[in-house]
Image (cartoon, rainbow, N blue to C red):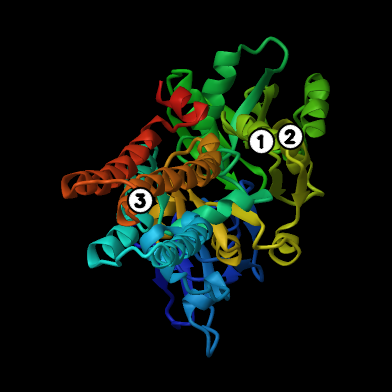
Amino acid sequence: MPVTPAVASANGSSLRIEPLCVIARSGEVVQGSSEVDETAVTGSVLPVLKRPGDRVLAGSRNGATPLEISQEADQPGMTDQAQLFGPREQQAADDPLDRFFGPFLRFWIRKLFICAVAGILAGLTWMIMQGRPISASGIFCLLIGLLSPGLLFVWPSQWLVARRWLKQHGMICRDPTQLMRLRYAAGFLFGRAGTLSHGQLRIVSLQPAGKTLPADFVTLAASAYQTVEDIWGRAILAFGISHRIRLRPSEDVVVEPGAGLSATVDGRRVIVGRQHWVEQHGIDTTLLADAIQEHVRLGRQMLIAAVMSPEPDCLGVLALADPPKPGAVDLVRLCKSSGIETILIANPAEKAATVLSGLLGVNRVVDPAAALTDLDPKRIVAIGRSNDRKLLARFERSITFGDAAVMQNPDHAFGLRREDPRHVLDFVILSQALARRLPLALLVVWLTGWPVAAAGLGLIRMPPQLVAICIGAGIVIAILQALLLRLLGSLVNDEAAD
């Protein structure tokens, strides 16, 4: 691997991108032809062939051929961050009550406050009408009883336990206000590659031709690709290593960008590439006609491996696809049962996107441009990785997926370090659990102050020791209610931990 990814040319107006290096700046190809891996930028798992005149994006990885690109001048009046993320909606200031009682209790604390004030006024009126003396201790008991200090401990204790629960499950919530709004989420919008799918091509099918043994087929194909680290090469080598094949030395490797490569392995000239390119070298693929037709129907990429010399021989076909993650189907099923719409960002015209959406069972597939303009950002939760930054910045509620994406986007309200998609729904589960438990805890704590208020009205006799015990009981009950959150946990998380 070269030490420097880009080298300035002699005239200083262009950059030379060495093979397999990351492109540091966007620009236009001036010289060279190579397949560029744009997975980290666009999310596309397919390599893109770049020729002179084509535009390359910063952050993508060059293929096996060096490129010379022109340096793209920065746009005046716009910073790099503005170009990358786009405008973000101005968020409203938080309610001051949220600082003390939490966003989930905003409605209930106002109701209790009104009831408490009304109770204090009614108590004072009753004492005047009954001719009872109004003492400072009586007013103090009324205030402490109807506005219990334990109310201030309900939300902090609940949130402390909730944060520990989030940390235990690899989840990050930087804004509790946004967590409350997840209860009203109408749909999940999943980004491109890497959220519901693995984000990289994998070999999903292997079909030898004729009497070729599968082990020999994979060994020759992986050995030919062992020195070329492109999308196809990584997929073939990963498949070969997982099946414990022994690579053989390869020589005279020649790469045809966008078509395939040829290499000499054990004295035989092996070619691996697209069907039309292999057929141009005189290889007959008739024996693989049925398998090729099936892969085309399923929207898979295909690589044909063959031997050119000493005798032409077709070895077989490798089918590559970006398969869904193990928990993706379960997540979509759970969302449907919860009434949450699932939306996948992809090109609806692509066969691979149609097949993936069918395997997952998502409700609909939308174009990336339509996702940024047509969907309501206040009712949809966007879920994506580092290559979906513009999408995550567009929606008010977004979840950054994957540990690397969480580290690169520390400003997002939500983050999920685990790669299991099923944990995305746990944010909604936590939001609903807090919405159910917090009002009940608030009511129980408030009821503990009623005996103190009754003592202030003179209805019962209560020594100062019992008044202190009732006040402390409200605080203890608030903490005990928070400890009940330790029992919270979706079945998904429990199964994953096991």
Front position in the image: 33 or 400? 400
Front position in the image: 429 or 33? 429
Callout 2 amino acid? Gly
Residue 62 shows in this picture:
no
- The earlier-in-sequence mark between 2 and 3 is 2
- The earlier-in-sequence mark between 1 and 3 is 1
> What residue is drawn where x is 83% and y is 24%?
289
What is the distance, in whole Å, between disc 2 and disc 3 at their CAs? 59 Å
Q: Is residue 443 left or right of residue 141?
A: right
Q: Which residue is mark 3?
A: 454
Front position in the image: 282 or 291? 291
Q: Which residue is mark 2?
A: 361
> What residue is drawn where x is 47% and y is 55%?
105
- The answer to whether mark 1 and mark 2 are in CB contact below 8 A is yes
Q: Is residue 470 left or right of residue 379?
A: left
Secondary structure of the residue carrying numbered label 1: helix
Against 376, residue 81 (above or below) is below
- The earlier-in-sequence mark between 1 and 2 is 1
Callout 3 amino acid? Ala
> What residue is drawn where x is 37% and y is 46%?
445
Against 496, residue 210 (above or below) is above
- The answer to whether mark 1 and mark 3 are in CB contact below 8 A is no
Q: Which residue is mark 1?
A: 332
Q: Is residue 452 left or right of residue 16?
A: left
User: Where residue 490 appears, x then y in whole percent?
Assistant: 50, 31
Against 417, residue 264 (above or below) is above
Residue farthest toward the left in the current orientation of the protein: 465
